[in-house]
Amino acid sequence: MRHALLPLTLTLIALFSTAAQAFEIEDHRWFGPKDGDVLRVISTTDTTILTPLIEVFLHDNPGVGLDYVVASSGDVMKALSEEGRQYDVALSSAMDLQVKLANDGFTRAHQSAATDLLPEWGEWRGHVFAFSQEPASIVVSAKALHADEVPHTRQALISLLRDQPDRFRGRIGTYDVAQSGLGYLFATQDARTAETYWRLMELMGGLGVELYCCSGDMIESVAEGRILVAYNVLGSYARARTDLAEHIVVIDPEDYTHLMMRSAVILKDGENADMAGRFVDHLIRAAWSTPRPQEYPFSDLSSDFTLQSDAQRPINLDPGLLVYLDRAKHKRFLEEWQNAVRQK
Amino acid sequence: MTAGAKSSVQISGSIRKRLLLQLLGTAAILASVLIVAVLGFVRDVAEESHDRILSASATSILDSVTVTAGSLSVDIPYAALSMLGNISDDRVFYSVTSGGTLLTGYEDLPDVSPPLSADGQQGQPAFPTVFQTLDYKGDSVRMATASRRLSLNGIPKVIAVNVAQTRDGQALILTRLTRSSMALGAGFFLLASLLSVWSAQSTIRPLATLTQAISRRGPKDLRPVARPVPSEMAPLVTSLNTFIERLSASLSRSEDFIAEAAHRVRTPLATVRTQAEITLRRVEREDNRTSLREMIRAIDESSRAAGQLLDHAMVTFRIDSLEQAEFDLSNLAEELVERLRPMAELRDISLVFDGHPPCLMRGDPILIQNAVRNILDNAIKYSPSDRQVWVSVTTEAGTECVSVHDQAGGFGDTDTRSLTERFVRGDNVQGTVGSGLGLTIAREVVEAHGGEIRIINTDTGDGACVTLCFPSL
């Protein structure tokens, strides 16, 4: 048995290779006064995106300081479940990890007038609360691709890549699913939904796909013209970059578009549960009340989306998300994915 | 009279109350049993359906365990866990073990894989699914364990899949169903209570109607109870009827006896009186004459009493089967006045009649004549000489009334109502012969006809007025 488990253990160590080190902080910012109540938030969301919402919250709650730490979704999970760091609220785009935090008992239940605004599918057992719905989009370079060439389905993208391999070789990008929790979530949901995904990955692998940690980098790469097509990019981030609007085209595929829900959990070990509840309520109210306030950074799906509603596939907040977090499943999926992408 | 009778009855509880309490008690017990039974049933069903879905989940994971290139691999189907999310938002835990060693999942989840030597299902590699309730990560969870034998490189292994889920959703469902079954039980109890009240009421009803029928009877009504009664009450009614019969027989025997006795006494008395009067004419000595007069007076008194007893017996008899004839009260009274006028004139009393026919009524004329005669007799008898007695017949407010107004000094301070009791006489009649039965007879006749008797002393205080009123035709 030992020898059977050994490779598995090794792979796990490789997977969470940063396990030995402390989790990696990407950005750290302090809002409001330093001497009052402190609300500690760990998040995968870029500081600049949430800043307007946070400032309105601090304006409504004077004397409160907000310690905002940005990390990758994997690191957020690690910080909370392995290192036992104390935070009051965790915001993450990795729905599976948020569900796992709640399932494994790291979170506390919360109920308020604001949580009543949520639809049933927008929360899980009163622990996980969605505050955005964001599409997994395709971003292409506006300069490099002719308007006729812009692919509106995965099939069209496959045809485009297959027909002109030399044009796209080394100039396509997607998430590194081994590195990004959100990338992994999108990839596993894609793999669940259609076989097209594996064909696309094999094709992209054959064309020397560039792997990225984050949506922001991919969007900038496309805008700068370093790559022509980026697959599974957060559409909300791409649309938010109005400065790059001329350089990129954001496509929500018409065959199916997964909708990720950014969600918040209140952590059990947090010291300021009351304030955490108020902050989560603030996020929920911004997201689910109509009309949405100006400071809400994410697009309003009902008005912005030109997509057919049956193409939208919201990812369900349910224990099914735990399946791809299973060690064996994770390992198997990554192996399969790497076989597809790294085939040179 | 009735109040006195009630207070002399010893009350030992109430049948209705006892019946009601017993029925309500039964209903309460049945309602509780119903609630407990429904709850138990519901809990079983909830647990069983939860077990089934856990078992389905565990089995589907177990099916995904394969031997690939000499090593075990697990590929958990997405649906295995998401199906658990469909029924509730409960936390889900799982683990897959091989020979007790964790392959994947939550390592601290208790593993209950059966030993390799355990008996499977009729030689099948799969073992029966095992369910248990335990505490895990601070919550009560229900866990299903599916397991089977697998040969790995020729070595048999037991692969077990444990799938556990917290039971908040189940508790929620149970709370809701508990509330429903409580409401069901309460509804049942309410309905049963209403039926109990109704049932107690209707059980008591024959008793109440019998009581009512008996208490509605007139004082002289001694007929047996003829209305149909439930079989349980038959012995009571039979005894009651026997009792009534005995009573009635004994009453009529004594009435007969009195009438017979009065009759037997009156006839010889008449002879004695005649003899005494003859003797009075012959006797010269004043002493002896006085004695004889005293004797005659005593004989008169006895004879009159015997007459009234006879009258009373006759009245009692006739009332039992009251004749219903139409006649004019005014004519009847006038006729009576004319008949008694000679006797009144003997005593220097003048009778004045004032009638306004027609005064039609229905009843037994003989009885009514008897009643009026007794009143008039009294008035004549108690009046001193040279006085008047007025008899008038009037119609007032649906009644026909005959009044006898005398100047005989009234009834004094005696309660006018008690005068109609048998053998009660006014305060100021000493020295006059009388039995005290006259007013009693009058009252019984009036009451048998549904009328009323009014006895008042006149304002001037020198007489009384007795009025008998009967319903008009």
Image: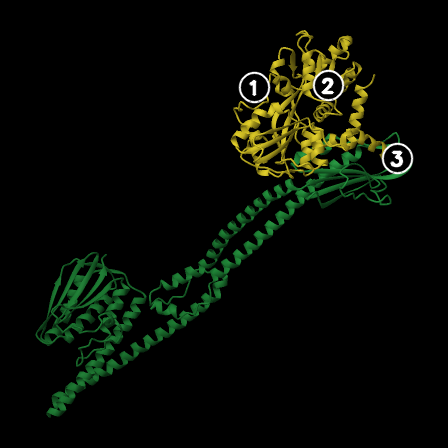
> What residue is shown at x 58% (from left), y 18% (from top)?
A304
Q: Mark 1 sits on what residue?
A: A303
Mark-to-mark CA distance, 3 and 1: 56 Å
In the image, the chain rendered in yellow is A
**Residue that badge 2 annotates:** A174
Task: Measuring from the top left, give residue B358's x and y in whole percent.
Answer: 17, 57
B25 w.r.t. A50: above or below? below
| Disc nearer the start of the sequence (2/3) | 3
Q: Is mark 1 on a helix, strand or loop?
A: helix
Of residues B412 and A136, the one drawn nearer to the viewer in this rendering: A136
Q: What element carries label 2?
A: strand
For label 1, the crowd category at 10 Å Cα-Cα, with few meaning under 14, some 14 to 19 and many 20 or more, is few
**Coloring scheme of the render?**
by chain
The disc, 1 or 2, on the residue closer to the chain's N-terminal end is 2
Dot 2, how many residues are within 10 Å of its Cα: few (below 14), some (14-19), or many (20+)?
many
Above or below, B173 relative to A162 = below
In this picture, residue B98 sits left or right of residue A233: right
CA separation, marks 1 and 2?
A: 27 Å
- Residue beneath label 3, please? A3
